[in-house]
Image (tube, rainbow, N blue to C red):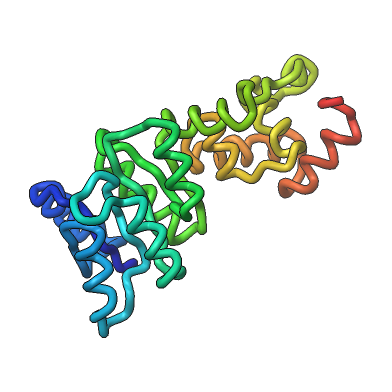
Amino acid sequence: MKRIAIVDDNRNLRHFFEEKFNESGVAQVVMTATNGQHFLDQLLKWHDPLPDLAVMDIEMPEMDGIETLRQTKLLYPEIEVIMLTVFDESERVFDAIKSGAIGYLLKDEPVEKIIETIVTITEENGAVMSPRIARKIFEFLQGRPAPQAPEVAEATTLSAREAEILNMLVEGYNYQEIAVRLFISPQTVRTHLKNIYKKLHVRNKVEAVKVAIKKRWFV
């Protein structure tokens, strides 16, 4: 059971997420705060185990989420932080990521998606962001869309999506990065990987990549 802190000046939203997180069976809300300064003040006096994860709004009075994130990572680097906000402006996203956020989700995400994100981050050591946010990041950093699958599918029993994922494996991406780039869930990527291994008669990612390189599918 992961310990969660909710930092948001919206009282109704705090209560809503606290209820949903506690009902999920994977997280327990141990702290709520109305703004960043309130959160840091509570941490300073905290005697129980620290929260594993803080779900934090950006726009808050007294101390906003970005500054709170910076101070939290400086003073309590073991606490992971997900930014949860209505804003998707590139500047805010980049500031949050540079300051140490492990996730960036929009408040219009279904609560089930937010809980899934917490599970991914705390149990699989992942990093997750809303698809709209991920698209902004990759367009900015690379100036081009995600790589397209070559015509491998026509020469194998792989589907076009499976060939695309195999291509990304060859390029060195892990399944979480593939999920973000293709705007699909990590579980969907795992399902595709299982199908790829089965069709190529291999047991794991390393063997699949070796087959692709040997056959020069992506040269």
Q: Along the line of sight, which residue is nearer the eye, 50 or 207?
A: 50
Counting from the top left corner in percent of width and height, residue 169 is at 71, 39
**Horizontally, is 16 left or right of 188 in the view?**
left
**Horizontally, is 28 left or right of 90 in the view?**
left
Residue 102 visible? The answer is yes
Please tell me in which quadrant of the rendered image residue 51 appears. Answer: bottom left
Residue in the image at 39% along x and 55% along y? 119
Residue in the image at 28% along x and 43% along y? 112
Counting from the top left corner in percent of width and height, residue 101 is at 44, 52
Is 63 above or below relative to 205? below
Is 214 above or below relative to 30? above
Residue in the image at 67% along x and 42% along y? 173
Count of numbered marks: 0
Please identify the residue farthest to the left as the structure is shown.
Answer: 12
Q: Along the line of sight, which residue is nearer the eye, 173 or 68?
A: 68
Please identify the residue farthest to the front as the structure is shown.
Answer: 62
Counting from the top left corner in percent of width and height, residue 46 is at 25, 80
Q: Along the line of sight, which residue is nearer the eye, 135 or 17?
A: 135
Residue 1 visible? The answer is no
Please tell me in which quadrant of the rendered image residue 131 appears. Answer: top left
Please tell me in which quadrant of the rendered image residue 139 appears. Answer: top right
Residue in the image at 67% along x and 26% along y? 164
Counting from the top left corner in percent of width and height, residue 1 is at 32, 68
Q: Quadrant of the C terminus?
A: top right
